[in-house]
Amino acid sequence: MKNIKLVFHFFLILFIVSCSNDIDSVLDENKEENQEIIEDEESVDDEVIDEEEIEEEDSEDNVAITEEDFFNYVYKGETVNIDNWTGQKVENTLSITASGSDGNSINLLFNTFGDQGKISSYSTTDFDFPSSENFAYFTSNFFTFELVNIDEVNKKVEVQFSGKLYEDEYDIESASHEVEGSFIASYVETEPSIANLGAYAQIDGESWYETGSFQTGGFVSGSDITLHQLSDNEHLISITINHEETEEGTFIFNADSSVNSVALSRYDVIAHEFVSYESSGTLVITAKEVGPQLTLLKGKFSLTGIDNTDSTTTDVTDGTFSIVYANY
């Protein structure tokens, strides 16, 4: 499988600019000659966070570090002298960034439900310092993250974490670096420009929250577009529409449907690839708002998926989504 850059929807998609050519889709059924994919673009969430952090530096509303706050961080067995950290919360997602006196830094994205997003280590001063991130797929299987407590009244969050960060987040065999740490950090709250972006579902009765997403197709007039939604667990939910033809309405789909459908997959940690389920169910598009560069798509879904490797059945219910994607 070729590398695919995730576009995280933790906060807000402001602008999606570039795409690459001739990249295979994650799922076999989505392979098309004209497919392109958003990649090699800095995470839009990081872009939003960066801009908001700059604004908050001069804000009287910025939450000061208190005596209760601390940040312990160990990188490759060496304790990092963390002397600065900041926190932000946008709706149900938090971003905590900490930096050492030598520039050694870490950023953690996660939600209030305890699901981890992208966790990144880097240096703000050393260009030779290898940047690394937690593995892109089924992240909770490869990295330990615990949301110990969140105090939304006093705006404090407590976390413990440990595991490997990889120089290539899509290659489990790439160079990796062990990190561990814990912290209690104060945070400020920021309102998003577009509220309630993301996806949610019940998978076999368990709550599933989107922590990241990526897009395949849709950059050639008339072609279909697939919007893939990831959580930190094994499951991937993929919604396929046609930008020009899909409108508000109810669509019944099955495993043979190529558009206006939803597919369930799981990440196989042995083969390191996604295994597709035979999916059938209902997709309802409740809103489609087309802008000059981006489209906001809202809806709900339910499906039953059959894993062909062992014939087990998985039920997905109460699915909802509010997604922004780039027009072709």
Image: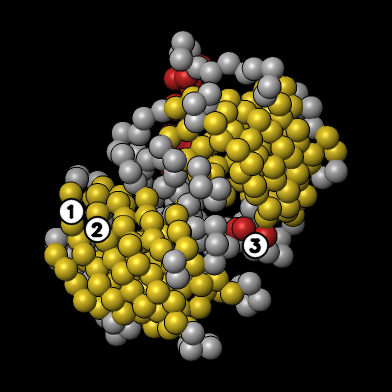
Indicate the amino acid at tag 2: Gly
Name above or below for residue 162 compared with residue 237: above
- Graded by Cα atoms within 10 Å as few (under 14), some (14 to 19) or many (20 or more), the crowding at tag 3 reads few
Residue lying farthest to the right in this orientation? 77
Q: Report how far apart the C-alphas of labels 3 and 1 lie in the structure.
A: 35 Å
Q: Nearer the viewer, residue 285 or 153?
A: 153
Q: Report how far apart the C-alphas of labels 2 and 3 lie in the structure.
A: 30 Å
Element type at mark 1: strand
Indicate the amino acid at tag 1: Ala
Q: Which mark is residue 141?
A: 3
Indicate the amino acid at tag 3: Asn
Element type at mark 2: strand
Element type at mark 3: helix
Residue at 79% from the left image edge and 27% from the top image edge? 81
* Disc on the earlier residue, 2 or 3: 3
Q: Give the residue pinned by disc 2.
A: 299
Q: Quadrant of the C terminus?
A: bottom left
Q: Quadrant of the N terminus?
A: bottom right
Residue 297: x %, y % from top left: 24, 54
Residue at 18% from the left image edge and 49% from the top image edge? 289
Residue 40: x %, y % from top left: 49, 51
Give yes or no for contact between labels 3 and 1 (Cβ–Cβ under 8 Å). no
Q: Is residue 167 left or right of residue 312?
A: right
Q: Report how far apart the C-alphas of labels 1 and 2 lie in the structure.
A: 7 Å
- Graded by Cα atoms within 10 Å as few (under 14), some (14 to 19) or many (20 or more), the crowding at tag 1 reads some
Residue at 33% from the left image edge and 62% from the top image edge? 319
Q: Which mark is residue 287?
A: 1
Q: Is residue 77 left or right of residue 85?
A: right
Q: Which mark is residue 124?
A: none
